[in-house]
Amino acid sequence: MKYAGLLVMPAGFFLSIASILLFPGSAQRTAFILCGIAVEGMGLVVAVRGHMQLRSENR
């Protein structure tokens, strides 16, 4: 799961960059950027939780 989270984080970044290039309206652009940031946050949570599970299994 840790690796899945690490792969999702750049996807959110590129989603935010694509919204700047594709959407001329500020409302659409803002919504897409917020979705990209949410995807990055979810990827970070998955990566951290995957790391925490591995650590608790070693104890």
Image (spheres, rainbow, N blue to C red):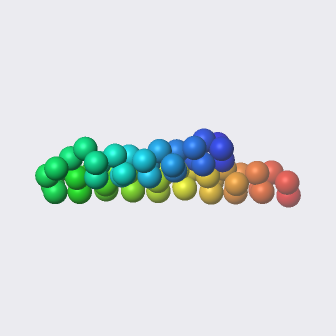
| Horizontal side of residue 48 vs 9, given as left or right | right
Q: Residue at x 70, y 57 (%)?
A: 52
| Depicted 22 relative to depicted 30: above or below | above
Residue farthest toward the front in the current orientation of the protein: 21
**Could you tell me how many numbered marks the image carries?**
0
Which residue is most to the right? 59
**Point 47% across, 56% down: residue:** 41
- Residue 35 appears left or right of 44: left
38 horizontally vs 52: left or right:
left
* Residue 13 appearing in the image: yes
Figure quadrant of residue 4: top right
Q: Residue at position x 60%, y 48% from top? A: 6
x then y, percent, for residue 16: 36, 52
Identify which residue is drawn at 52% across, 45% down: 8
Question: In front here: 23 or 55?
Answer: 23
Q: Quadrant of the N terminus?
A: top right
| 39 lies left or right of 24 | right
Quarter of the picture containing the C terminus is bottom right
User: Residue 53: where, in percent of width, then height?
Assistant: 71, 52
The percent coordinates of residue 34 (x first, y second) are: 31, 56
